[in-house]
Amino acid sequence: MAFKLEHPYHQLTVFLGTKHLKEKALVPALEALGIQCVATLVDTDQYGTFTGEVERKGSVLETLKKKTKEVFEKVPDARLALASEGTFGPHPQIGFISSDHEALLLVDKAMGLQIYVDEISLETNLGEKVLKSFEELGSFLESVKFPSHGLIVQPLENQKVMFKGITDLNALEKAILKSIDHSPTRQAKVTTDMRAHFNPTRMKVIEQVGRKLVKRLSSFCNKCGLLGFWPVEPVEGLPCAECGQPSEAVKAYRWGCLKCSYQEIRPREDGKTQIDPVHCQGCNP
Ligand SMILES: [Zn+2]
Ligand SMILES: [Zn+2]
């Protein structure tokens, strides 16, 4: 007889706090576990905007906690609340290259669990250009994937005048001309609109981190059986292929349970067991 264990969250509903249609990116992955994902309107702008009218305070995790707390206030009977947060900037390891850091927090009120996952992607159209005329746009539009991706236009020095979510060329031209008129130096700043519903590239990264959440929810503690068993700490010491000396590269991960103290060391998931001697301190100092 076929025997299939049902996921503990099977047939539960998770309420996602969003006003930017992020559920589109998360519904399919969660459905695979039998979890229904429903959007709950939360004015996420109050926790900070990409355009700086509202400053972001606190860490990504703190912001995610505030968002899930608001979901529970809006839906008092909910057991599961979900929130998403993205930040953009130079890649934390590689530097100078733009990256998208996407994080998700799922809170299970009944079990008292906070399940966090994140992902850093180099796939982003992040960009900005300051210009004195519409013609100066040049190849910028192509590089930021306009018009499938939205743009924001404002006078260089003035945050009060702002045109968001622009996806057609006429509107873009008008916004640039108006912004130049409102600028003491007659310069407009054009930036990419990073809000999920104006940014399909970002939606894809949210989808990726959603799949990671499902992976974490499908991983169980070998001792107490709780879901969410996940790497908690890297273990360094990946040996050199030539001399065998341990390097600073990650050899394995210490996995941990959300509730009990059980831990396990597991090798890297990419199967890498050695480093190239080129990166070895001994062979190539
Ligand atoms: Zn456990
Ligand atoms: Zn070596």
Image (cartoon, rainbow, N blue to C red):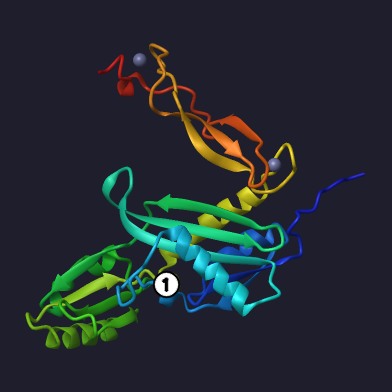
Q: Is residue 216 visible?
A: yes
Residue pushed farthest left? 185
Q: How many marks?
A: 1
Residue at point 93%, 44% (across, down): 1
SS under mark 1:
helix
Determine if residue 205 is in view: no
Left or right: 50, with 73 as reference point: left
Pick the residue in front: 30 or 246: 246
Q: Position of residue 56 (x, y in %)?
A: 36, 68
6 vs 177, left or right, is: right
Callout 1: CB less than 8 Å from ligand 1: no
Residue found at the very far top of the displayed protein: 243
Residue 238 at x, y percent in the picture: 44, 23
Query: In the figure, 121 relative to 201: above or below?
Result: above
Who's the residue at 76% across and 64% down the image?
Answer: 11
Q: Tag 1: residue type?
A: Tyr
Q: Quadrant of ligand 1?
A: top right
Q: Is disc 1 surrounded by few (<14), some (14 to 19) or many (20+) residues within 10 Å?
A: some
- Tag 1 residue: 47
**Residue 86, percent across and down?**
42, 62
**Quarter occupied by residue 179:** bottom left
Does 36 appear above or below 179?
A: above
Q: Quadrant of residue 249?
A: top left
**Seen from this angle, which residue lies furthest right?**
1
Which image quadrant is residue 128 in? bottom left
Q: Position of residue 6 (x, y in %)?
A: 79, 53
Out of 56 and 181, give the one closest to the viewer: 56
Image quarter in which the C terminus is found: top left
Vertical position of residue 5 compared to residue 57: above or below: above
Q: Nearer the viewer, residue 46 or 140?
A: 46
